[in-house]
Amino acid sequence: MIILQEIKRSYDGRVVLNIPYQEFEDGKTYFIKGESGTGKTTMFNIISGLALPEAGIVQVGDAMVQLMSERERDAFRADNVGYVFQDFNLFDGFSALENVMVPLTFATQKLSAATAKQRAKEALDKVGLGDKATRKVNKMSGGEKQRVAIARALVNVPKVLLADEPTGNLDRRNSGAIMDLLIASARACGATLLVISHDLSLADKFDEVLDIYDINQGEE
Ligand SMILES: Nc1ncnc2c1ncn2[C@@H]1O[C@H](COP(=O)(O)OP(=O)(O)OP(=O)(O)O)[C@@H](O)[C@H]1O
Ligand SMILES: [Mg+2]
C-alpha cells in the first residue's frame, strides 16, 4: 500500500501539493488525470523519494520515505520503484543497454556486471527492443526512447511503477500498446501502477481513474 497523509509541498512560497489523505492499493492500476501544473509530477517525485514534502507522511509498503536520508531514498527507489519520467531522462550518448543498467548500480543488492547486463537485456526484450540494445538512444525514435525508459523502470522488478505521461509523444496505436505493456509489466511484477495521462481514451484499461483535483486540495 502507498499512503500519502497530510502532505504539503510548496515551491517559491506557493502551495503546489496539499494532500489530506490518499492511498493506492497493492497490485492495482491507476490512471491519474488533471490539468497542467496541478502537481501530478510533484506527487510522483514525492512517492519516489526524489522530492521531500515539507510536512506529512509518505509510506510505501513498510518504508517511511520522508524519514530517510537522500542516500537511503536513492537505495529505496532503486529497490522498489520504477519511474518512467515525463521527459525520459535518458543519457543520450549511452546505448539503450547502458541506460537500462543504471538503476542496477544503485540497488542494495549488487549484481555482477554480467548479471546486470543480462537483466538489462531481458528488460529490453520485454519492451521489444532486444535487437537494439547497443544502439545509442540519441539515434532512436521518440517511441523507442519511451520503451527504453520503460525497460529501465522495469529492470529492478519494482513494487511501484510510476509512469508520467508515457504516451505523450506517441500516436494512438502505439499509445494503446504502451499502456498495455505497462499494465502487463505491472501485473508480471505484482506492482502497483500509477500512470499520469490526459489521453482519456486509454483510461478504461485501468482499475481506477482518479482526478488530481480529488487528491490534491491545493492552496487553502
Ligand atoms: N522544482 C521546482 N521548482 C519550482 N517550481 C516547481 C518545481 N517543480 C514543480 N514546480 C511548480 O509546481 C507546479 C506543479 O508542477 P508539476 O510538474 O507537479 O505539475 P503537473 O501536474 O505535472 O503538470 P504537467 O501536466 O504540465 O506536467 C507548477 O506550477 C510548477 O511550476
Ligand atoms: Mg507533469
Image (tube, rainbow, N blue to C red):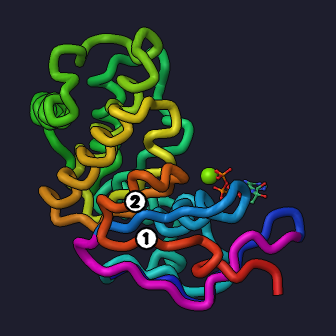
Q: Are marks 1 and 2 in contact (CB under 8 Å)?
A: yes
Q: Position of residue 151 (x, y in %)?
A: 28, 37
What kind of element bears circle 1?
Answer: strand
Residue at mark 1: 209
Residue at mark 2: 203
- Which residue appears farthest toward the front when viewing the image? 201
Label 1 Cα neighbours within 10 Å, binned few <14 / some 14-19 / many ≥20: some
Q: Is residue 90 visible?
A: yes
> Residue at 49% of width from left, 64% of height from top?
32
Between 133 and 113, the one lying in front of the other is 133
Between 142 and 84, the one lying in front of the other is 142
- Name which of mark 1 and mark 2 comes first in the sequence: 2
The main secondary structure of the magenta stretch is: strand
Q: Which residues are magenta?
A: 14-28
Q: Is residue 62 a member of the stretch shown in magenta?
A: no
Ligand 1 is found in the corner quadrant, namely: bottom right
Q: Which mark is residue 90?
A: none
Q: Position of residue 109 (x, y in %)?
A: 20, 54
Q: Quadrant of the C terminus?
A: bottom right
